[in-house]
Image: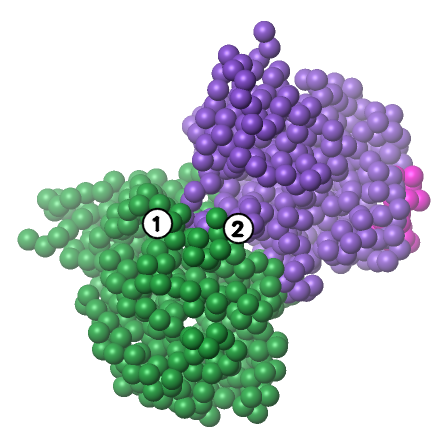
Chain colours: A green, B purple
Amino acid sequence: MPDQILLKNTLIVTMNSNLDIFEGDILVQDGMITQVGKITDNRNCEEFNAHGYIVIPGLIQTHVHLSQALFRNLADDLSLLDWLTKKILPFENKHTPETLRVSAQLGLAELIKSGTTTIMDFGTVRHQQVIFEELAASGLRAFAGKTMMDCGDMPESMKEKTSESLAESEALASQWHNYDNGRLKYAFAPRFVLTCSKELLIETGKLAKKFKTLLHTHASENKDEARLVMEKYGERNILLFDKLGLADENLCLAHCIWTDEKETALLKERKIKVLHCPSANLKLGSGIAPIPKYLKEGIHVSIGADGAPCNNNMDVFNEMRLASLIQKPLHGPEAMPAVETFKLATIYGAMALGLEDTIGSIEAGKAADLTFIKNNQVHSIPYDNIYSKLVYSTRSSDVEHIMINGKWILRDKQLIKINENKLLDSIESQKVNFGIN
Amino acid sequence: MPDQILLKNTLIVTMNSNLDIFEGDILVQDGMITQVGKITDNRNCEEFNAHGYIVIPGLIQTHVHLSQALFRNLADDLSLLDWLTKKILPFENKHTPETLRVSAQLGLAELIKSGTTTIMDFGTVRHQQVIFEELAASGLRAFAGKTMMDCGDMPESMKEKTSESLAESEALASQWHNYDNGRLKYAFAPRFVLTCSKELLIETGKLAKKFKTLLHTHASENKDEARLVMEKYGERNILLFDKLGLADENLCLAHCIWTDEKETALLKERKIKVLHCPSANLKLGSGIAPIPKYLKEGIHVSIGADGAPCNNNMDVFNEMRLASLIQKPLHGPEAMPAVETFKLATIYGAMALGLEDTIGSIEAGKAADLTFIKNNQVHSIPYDNIYSKLVYSTRSSDVEHIMINGKWILRDKQLIKINENKLLDSIESQKVNFGIN
C-alpha cells in the first residue's frame, strides 16, 4: 500500500497552463500529486482538512546564499564591491565547518518557514560538504555548488588554485548530483568574472556539460563591476560568456541589471536564465533590472532573495512584492502585474532549473511540493484577484505548512527536520566568530 | 494607589536624543512612563517579564486611510488619477455606515497587529462619525478628519457644497478634537487641490487655525496631478498653498514627489510636514520622493502606508524597509541608513503631529505607547546594529504586544478591543457591496 494523503476542501492556485483556481482536493501518493479536483471516492487513506488555506505550488528561489545567513545585518549600507571585499569575503573566509553548518541551518529554517520549497544555492569556497549535508537533512529541494574563485581582490588564503577548484567541484558533483532521487542536484558555481580566470570559466563550462547540469554565477549586477569586466577582458560580461563557450540554456545568471542590446539579444537567443533579486539590487544600490523588457523579449526570468546580508531577509514574499512594485514608477502601474510576478516564483522558477516537469505547478504527475497559506487574515482581505492577494498583501508569516515530495517539512509553523531552539542556541555561540557580542 | 506596571528585563530602544539602547526596565504609572533604566526598589506593583523582547516606541504612521481598508486588493495596477476616479471614489461613494465601520475596524486591526500605535487618518466624505467612534473604541492614538471635496472629477452624489463641507467638518472637530484627554484629535482633510475650490481651501485653513490643529492633505503625488494643478490654478501645488494662506507648520502633505526648488525651499522655510508613503508611490507608479534631499535640507519627513488598495498592506515595517531600499539605487547604498529611517516612524512621526512631548521615544514623562518585538527569530538574527535589524529584517509578525497610554491593546498577538472573529464575519457579509463574491 503506497504512502497516501488526501488534502481536502482547499483553495488551489494551480499555476497550470490554464491558471486554474478552484476549491477542491489534492491526492498525494508516494510523494507525487496523483489527482487534483473534487475527489469523492472513499480511498481509505489519511485525510488532511485543508479548509481555510490557499494551497500554492511550493515557492522557488533560484538564487540564495545559505553560507551568508549568519552575516545578516552585519554588512549594511555598502555598495556591491565594497560589501564583497570588505565584509562578505572576509566573513566567508572565517567560516569553520561549525559556523557554516549553523549558517546553512539558519538560512534553511528561514526559507522553509517563509514558504520556499526549492532553492538554487550559491555556496562558499571551503567546507561545501557541510552545506550539502544540511540540504540533505532539511528535506528541501535544491541545486547547490561550491564557490569557485582563483583570482581577484580577496583574502589570499581563500584564493584557489584553478586545478584544485575544478577537482573539488567535480568530486562534490560526483557525490551529490542527483542525491535522494534527484532532490539535490549540483550546479557549478564560479563566483563572478572578476574572481575567475578564463581557464577556470572555460573548464567549469565543460564540467557542467559533462554532468548535464547548470552553471550558476553572478553577472552585470553593478556598474563598476561591468566596467572592470570590460577592462579585464575587453568584452562585456554576457558576451564574454559566449566567447568562453558558456552561453547556453544551462547558464543561470544572477542579477543582469547592466546589460546592453547585444547582451539582451544573447540572453534571448541562447535561452540563458536571468535570476532576479530585487531587494538585494536595491540594498546594494546596484540598480533596477530591466525585467519587464526581458519578459517582453521572451527572456527567462525567475526570482531569489540572494543572501541575508544584502537583503536582509530570504523571504520570497518580500521579493515578489518588490519585483512588482519597483518596476511601476519606471514602466507604469500596469507593469509586472501580480500574476506575472507570481510566475517568477513558481513555474518560471521550475523552468530556470529544468524542473518544469517536476515542480512549479499543482498538477497530477508532479511532485507534491506545496505551500499552505492561511487565507482569512486581517492584512490580506478582502480580495478579488487572488494573485494580487498573494503578491501584494500576503506575508511570509501566513505560511502555515509546507510539504516537499509529499512529506511535511513545516507543520503549524513548526520546523519538522530542524530543531529550532537548538539552532537559536548555536547561533548565540557561533556569532562571536564574526565580531558580534 | 495609581495604576502601575513594571516592564522588566527588556531591551529598550529609546529613540531619545542620545539614541540610548540598553537592557533594563520601564515603569508605567497612570498611562505614563515614569522611569526607564534599572529599577531595583521593590515597588509592590504588577510586573511584566519582558525578557526576550525589544521594546520600541509605539510606531507612528502619519498618513493612512481607514475608510479604504475594505478595498484592499480591488484596485491594482492603475495610476493615481485612474485609480482614484475609476475605483476609489466610486467605492467610497458606496460606503454605508455599516461598511465604513467594518472598513475602519479592519484597518485598525491590521495597524494594531503590526505595531502601529498612532495614526493620522484621512477620512471619507460621509459618515465620518463612524470612523471616530471606531477610533474611540480601538484605544489607538489618532488624528482624523472627514474628507472635504467640492469640485472636480467624481460621482456627483459625493460632491459637497462648500459651506456644508465646512460646517460638517467644524461640527466634527467640535465633537472629537481632544477626545479622551487628547488621545483623538481632529485634522482637517481637504482631499487634494484638484477636488477643492479655492474657497474651500482658504476657509479650511481658517478652521485649522481656529482649532489650533493640523491641515492634512495630498500634494504633488503624480506628474499628471501636478500638471493639472498648474492648469487649474496657474501655480505649482505647494506654492499655491502659500498663496491660500495654508503654508505653515500645521500643514501636513502626503507624498510631495514632484516638487521643484522653490517648493522645496517653501517646505523648509514654513516647516511644512512631508508624509512619505513609499509603497503607495511605487504601486501607483507615481515615483520616488526625494526624501534624502528633504532630510538634508532639514525638511520634516515622517512615514505612512497610505491606503490598503494602493499598497496593499498598512504595515509600517514594509514602509520602513522600502523607505531605505528605494533610495539606494538613486543616491548610493549609504543613503537612508536604518537609524534615519527608524526615526521617520518614531520621533519624526511624533514631531509631524506636534506630539513630540508625548510620544515618539521611550522617556520618563512621555505616554506609555510601546511596541514589543520578539527578538530571537530565524529571519532577523544575528545583528550588530539594532536599527538594521528593525528596519531591514524585522517583520510585522514579530510584534507580540502593544500598549497605548499604558493599556494593553494587543497581547500575545491578540486584539484586546476588537473581536477579530466577528470582524472577519462582518467582512464576509459586507464585501459583496463592493462587487466581491
Given the image, on which type of amino acid does mark 1 rest? Answer: Ser
Crowding at label 1, few (<14), some or many (≥20) Cα neighbours within 10 Å?
A: some
Q: Are marks 1 and 2 on the same chain?
A: no
Q: What element carries label 2?
A: loop
Give the residues in magenta. B232-246
Kindly report the secondary structure that dominates the magenta region of the rendered protein.
helix
Chain under label 1? Answer: A
Indicate whether residue A101 is drawn in magenta: no
Please indicate, yes or no, whether residue B268 appears anywhere in the rendered image: yes
Q: How far apart are marks 1 and 2 (CA)?
A: 17 Å
Mark linked to residue B384 = 2
Q: Which residue is drawn at 64% across and 54% down?
A: B337
Q: What element carries label 1?
A: helix
Mark linked to residue A426 = 1
Q: Residue at x 48, y 48 (%)?
A: A437
Q: Viewed as shown, does residue A39 lie left or right of B355?
A: left
